Image (spheres, rainbow, N blue to C red):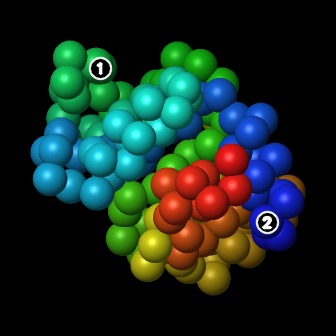
Amino acid sequence: MTSTELRELLDNARVIAVVGHSDSPTRTSYRIAQYLRQMGYKVYPVNPTVDEIDGEKSYPSLASVPEQIDIVNVFRRSEHLPGVVEEAIAVGAGAVWAQLGVEHPEAARLAEEANLPIVMNNCIKVSHGMLV
């Protein structure tokens, strides 16, 4: 995606589901989710191993998130990305954004076939800071 497309994606998003959101403040997923909240996004933690994070309910899957998801932000290892993309397609998410170091050719193929925008190996916080 071009810088303009990334900016539009971030500008138009309201709801972000963070897959792999940790409940530990020392983890990158926790810190970036906090940043996204501070920037005005509604952030839903998606982590089946945690019931709540900072008093907010954590959801076991994308399908259980109670709102339409604009961006699925992925903090899982690359081998899990195709499954997350399949879930994102199933719930009608607007885009998938895989963090630094997370990329998978099958995930890209699945997203492309479904006309689902996908960003891989890119930090949403860094991009937001530079583009928005």
User: In terms of secondary structure, where does tag 2 sit?
Assistant: helix
Label 2 or label 1, whichever comes before in sequence order: 2
Mark 2 nearby-residue class (10 Å; few <14, some 14–19, many ≥20): few
Return the mark for residue 3: 2
Type of residue at label 1?
Answer: Lys
- Along the line of sight, the residue nearer the viewer: 128 or 83: 128
Type of residue at label 2?
Answer: Ser
Instruction: Judge depth for marks 2 and 1 and give the one in front.
Output: 2
Whether residue 20 sits left or right of residue 7 in the image: it is left
Q: Residue at x 36, y 71 (%)?
A: 77
* Location of the N terminus (image quadrant): bottom right
Q: Is residue 75 something one can see in this rendering?
A: yes
Q: Residue at x 69, y 73 (%)?
A: 108
Look at the picture and state if 51 lies above or below 48: above
User: In terms of secondary structure, where does tag 1 sit?
Assistant: strand
Residue 129: x and y in percent read: 57, 54
Return the mark for residue 57: 1
Number of numbered discs on residues: 2
Q: Is residue 117 something one can see in this rendering?
A: no
Whether residue 53 sits left or right of residue 20 in the image: it is left
Look at the picture and state if 131 lies above or below 82: above
Look at the picture and state if 36 lies above or below 67: below
Q: Residue at x 47, y 38 (%)?
A: 36
- Along the line of sight, the residue nearer the viewer: 71 or 86: 71
- Along the line of sight, the residue nearer the viewer: 124 or 111: 124
Image quadrant assignment for residue 58: top left
Mark 1 nearby-residue class (10 Å; few <14, some 14–19, many ≥20): some
- Along the line of sight, the residue nearer the viewer: 40 or 86: 40
Image quadrant assignment for residue 116: bottom right
Mark 2 vs mark 1, CA separation in Å: 33 Å
Residue 15: x and y in percent read: 59, 29
Residue 19: x and y in percent read: 41, 47
